[in-house]
Image (tube, rainbow, N blue to C red):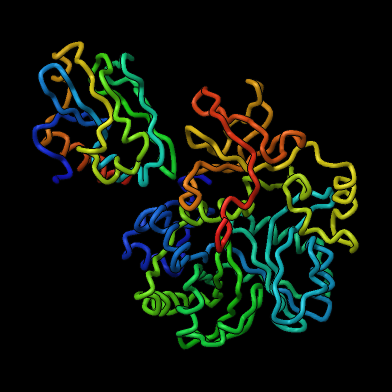
Amino acid sequence: MSSVPAGLKYSKEHEWVRLDGDVATLGITHFAQEQLGDVVFVELPEKGATVRQFASLGVVESVKAASDIYSPVSGEVLERNVKVIEKPELVNSSPYEEGWMLKVRLADRGEVQQLLSADDYRAHIGETAGSGGD
Amino acid sequence: MTGAEALRRTPLYERHVALGAKMVPFAGYEMPIQYSGIVAEHRAVRSAAGLFDLSHMGEFSFTGREAGAALDRLVSSDIAGLDVGEARYGLLTSERGTIVDDVIVYRLATDRYLMVVNAANIEKDAAHVRARLDPSVRFDDASRSTALVAIQGPKAEDVLARLVPAARDLAPFGVMDAKIAGGDGVIARTGYTGEDGFEVFVRDDLAAKVWDALMAAGRDDGLLPIGLGARDTLRLEARFSLYGNEIDETTDPIEAGLGWTCKLDKDFLGRDAIAAAKERGPDRRIAGLVVDGGVARHGHAVTKDGEVVGRVTSGTFGPSVGRSIALAYVPAALAKVGTALAVRIRDRDVPATVVRTPFWKRGGG
């Protein structure tokens, strides 16, 4: 699988969204998991919770450090991926498939306009990678 | 240190970059934090072998007829009892009985000793030692010209023995002069991972040859280069103290769980204060914690029934333990194995239990 699959939307904070009607599935990108290293713990909101676009929805911890996950969209949590909580390494091995984190019912479809296309995200991480950040 | 200060590079810098290491500033050096990934590197050391560049560490040499006696007064452990070819872990202590650094002292010859000190403490330790050393003993800080390559793990002996067959006969904490990769080195059976392993001291200009020879010798044994990230998870599982985390100039050896390194029936710096601390019993102690529901990190508060009672000194996810583990200072009464505590992670008190340490032990447990 491509490190930036086409057909998904991306946030500058390195989350991805897959849209299906008014349901958004989201997770963190291949680039994000690579930067984090081995993921050992994932903290996600429960079903029924509300998430807001660009606000922290949870935390992913690698061996090295803890990082916030920012929600790329606003809405109500329909489901969280229990498998990724039990096996956090899925975030590394399969960030766009088995490593998904939440399914959210979109509160405002218009928010999707604020997100990046695959091409724009690729350009974005080109810049980020070039700046030498860790 | 500030970003403006120039970082030093070890003689293996080019090797790290060629191996794709992520380099970070550490104790004034640009050091590899990881190559293939912390967990993969950690597992390689536990199951096969790993190669470490530790050239940032400090090496002091002490020469003279009185060197052993002089070191015995500066270091907490039984240095006077070292035979030639033996090494011992111990503490440089202050007059107040606190910890200046943790070190290993190697007796290389009747009148010659090597002391390995933490990279961040080289200048401080040198000043501390110089100010208190018997003037008849010659002191040299060889840190800048000495490289240190460690090979650690169950396959370390097999790999090193291909270059230096005599390494097989070295006892734990044994040390010897040896020819390696066409030059002179000092090889010791010491380390910081909880595994069998060796540390190889050579002059800077031989370091790359030693590194390449060991990498080649271990290729079929699963030898991997190991960064500082896995070095930390390995040492924490083995419950080795890290200077700046568990121990510093405000901590005494008793509360740090390092009373065993203090030979109280000899005279050494701070001996009386340490003996008194032992007699009194410490107010706080280092406890080993397993944490359920998050990863404890350096600086997190330890709580009991919502009250802050202590502080995490080191915390990570232990790949071989398979759990989040931490060391923390807690009141002595709460340091007993089985005590239920919590670690405050992102404003939430996450359950933690005091467990027996080391968290991980070679050969099961």
Toward the viewer: A99 or A5?
A99
Toward the viewer: A90 or B28?
A90
| Picture layout, residue B91 above or below residue B166 | above
Please state if B168 lies on the left or on the right of B113 as rendered: left
Name the quadrant containing residue A2. top left
Please state if A17 lies on the left or on the right of B293 as rendered: left
Residue B60 pos. (x, y %): 67, 69
Say which residue appears at 41% left-offset and 53% top-offset: B38
Figure quadrant of the C terminus of chain B:
bottom right
Toward the viewer: B204 or B246?
B246
Residue B243 pos. (x, y %): 64, 51
Say which residue appears at 20% left-offset and 38% top-offset: A97
| Picture layout, residue B73 above or below residue B333 | below
Please state if B79 lies on the left or on the right of B47 as rendered: right
Q: Evaluate whether residue A26 shows in this view.
A: yes
Name the quadrant containing residue A126. top left
Task: Kindly give the residue lying farthest to the top in the view shown.
Answer: A107
Name the quadrant containing residue B313. top right
Residue B307 pos. (x, y %): 66, 21
Residue B217 pos. (x, y %): 39, 79
Q: Evaluate whether residue B23 shows in this view.
A: no
Please state if A113 lies on the left or on the right of B280 as rendered: left
